[in-house]
Amino acid sequence: MHRAWLALLASALSVASAQDSTHPPGWVVIPVTEYGALRDRAFPIEEKTKPPAVDSTLTRVDYDLQIDGSLATGQAKLTVDVLKDGWVRVPIPAGLLVHEAKLDGKPLSLVSEKGGLYAVFSRPLLTGGRAVLELNVALPAATTGGEERLTLPTSPSGITRASVTLPREDLDIKVAGGILSENSGTGGLSRWLAYGRSNGSLTFSWRRKIEDHHVELPLKLRGSMTELVSLGEDSTSIYAEAGLEIAQGAARQARIQLAPNIIVNQVSGAMVADWEIKSGELVVKFLEPVEKDVRFVIVGEARLPREGAVDVPLLRLLDTERESGGVAVEVVGAGEIKDVKAQGLERADPGELGQTVLSRQSPAMVAFRFRTMPAPGTVPTLAVQVARYAQQAVLTANIEEARYRVLLTTDGKMLVQARYAVRNNQRNFVRIRLPDGAVVWSSSLAGTPVRAGQAEDGSLLFPLTKSRAGEEAQAFAIEILYLVRGAAWSDKGRASLDLPALDLPISRTGAVVHYPPLFHVSAEAGAFRMQAFENPSSPALSGDASGQAEVRPASPDQSAASQAATQSLVDQYKARIETRRGATRVPIGVEFLAVGPSLFLVSELTAESHNPTIQLAFQKSRKGGVK
């Protein structure tokens, strides 16, 4: 039998293989495993939804309790969210004595299991997954050391709200494990509303309020007033720190006597509720009656004479048995206090009046303190004699004039001679930042060759000579000759000439720009403007380093012979440059070659650390000259 089945299976496989070799075009043959995978993807099997981890959850617990003696009775509402169909079991918070239970208004029997109470019910999800359990409960209230306490049991609910009513008033209430939201007492009843935390107990504790008759006694207080008066040019500022120390009773407000010319701008302090001015008095109201001490600050101003006799406005605390503190007066600006007339005050050191006065201490300040035992009927007054002085500006350093001579070539090279007339009183160095890629050929200070220092950013540092005390600063010259390589000129275009930036302001600037004769050159609108040539106005720039006068720029209308001579000078200049390229030291005393037609440009008031820039437009011409 088995041999017959094997023979039949072998013949079937041979027929299948023969059919595979004779499949017509368009057929696809795949293994059975791949076919099964494709079928599963085409007809996926829906996965069953996983059941929730819990059957139900306790969302909210609301207590409404009334305390009578040592027992609190009332109602507890448990809001339950059911998460599955069928029967669920909800635990009742431990510690509750339940008399009756209802589910959505219908009676419900509770089940006791494993030492706890449970509510078991069935609620289809299609009719709503939320249920409300109403429980009539009772809780014991404990008494310890004159304090009564009610503790609500721990529950896993997200919200626990408790309303407690007690048939007594004048109670001090405290809540632990939550927040007291409402505390009211009317009609012989006290009602408290509090919210507890999840998985925590909520405890109410109360005791009879102890009446303190101390606040009903007549008010007795001591005060301190520390005042700082700053006499300015236009107005006088007043800053005062006031303090009250209550010896008996409770202070609901403070009264401060004001001078007629004082304007109060602000009163600030932790206990300050409001303030107002009535009949020349400043009344400061507190948030609640103060039984110990309180401090606040008064900020104001006054219109007083700028100089001469000045009556200093004093702030005085009223209704005090004793007043301490004092007043300090300072002069703001160029001036001093020449004479002082004080009554009911004692001269004091500014440091005795506190840190605020000590931090502002200056030579032009006088300080007084109130006398401890003033004579009867003595009113403290203070008058000072103020002398003012005219303020004069002190010049530390300035570049009163800058002069530049620039020689341009068609291959983009620019030779610049920069000369500055400097006046100095206090500065030690002047910082000069040359354009990027500039190579210094020579430098001098007041006609003497010097080698400038170099800052971290590559700027040059030139030492400055200072004038003697009491003498006017004399102007001296700083000169720098440097070369900059730029882009070669085409037949037509624009060129931007960047000049050095100094860390001092420059009052006026003049620049003579020499350019190749075969080009028309004009200055574009910018910081510089064209005008007729003028010699330097500063005596320090009346001659160059060799004592020769500055060469007047050549007229653009040159003859052919003049142009030929200019070209010869340019060739000689290039030959001299080639012979100096191997030098390793900076040459001293190199002369500037002023050749070719030129423009004269001027500028005013160059800011410190600013690179002045000259914008030019050029165009090649067969005859040359200025366009």
Image (cartoon, rainbow, N blue to C red):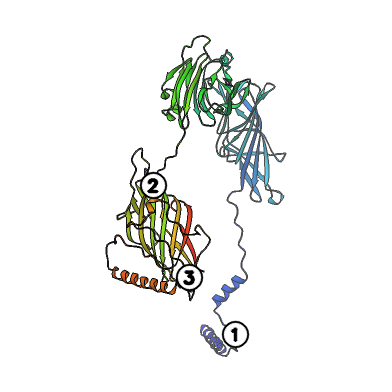
Instruction: Give the foreground label among 1 and 2.
Output: 2
Indicate the position of residue 3 as horizontal and vertical percent values. 51, 85
Q: State the residue at coordinates (45%, 37%).
A: 392
Q: CA distance from mark 1 to mark 2?
A: 102 Å
Instruction: Give the foreground label among 1 and 3.
Output: 3
Indicate the position of residue 117 as horizontal and vertical percent values. 60, 38
Left or right of residue 148, residue 603 in this image: left
Label annotation for residue 27:
1
Label annotation for residue 365:
none
Q: State the residue at coordinates (62%, 23%).
A: 277
Instruction: Give the foreground label among 2 and 3.
Output: 3
Q: Is residue 571 above or below residue 142?
A: below
Q: Mark 2 sits on what residue?
A: 423
Closer to the chain start, of discs 1 and 2, is 1
**Towards the viewer: 70 or 19:** 70
Q: CA distance from mark 1 to mark 3?
A: 91 Å
**Towards the viewer: 246 or 281:** 281
Q: Amino acid at mark 3?
A: Gly
Closer to the chain start, of discs 2 and 3, is 2
Q: Amino acid at mark 1?
A: Trp
- Disc 2 element: strand
Q: Amino acid at mark 2?
A: Arg
Q: Is residue 28 above or below residue 396?
A: below
Kindly tell me whether residue 611 is visible in this rendering: no
Q: Mark 3 sits on what residue?
A: 625
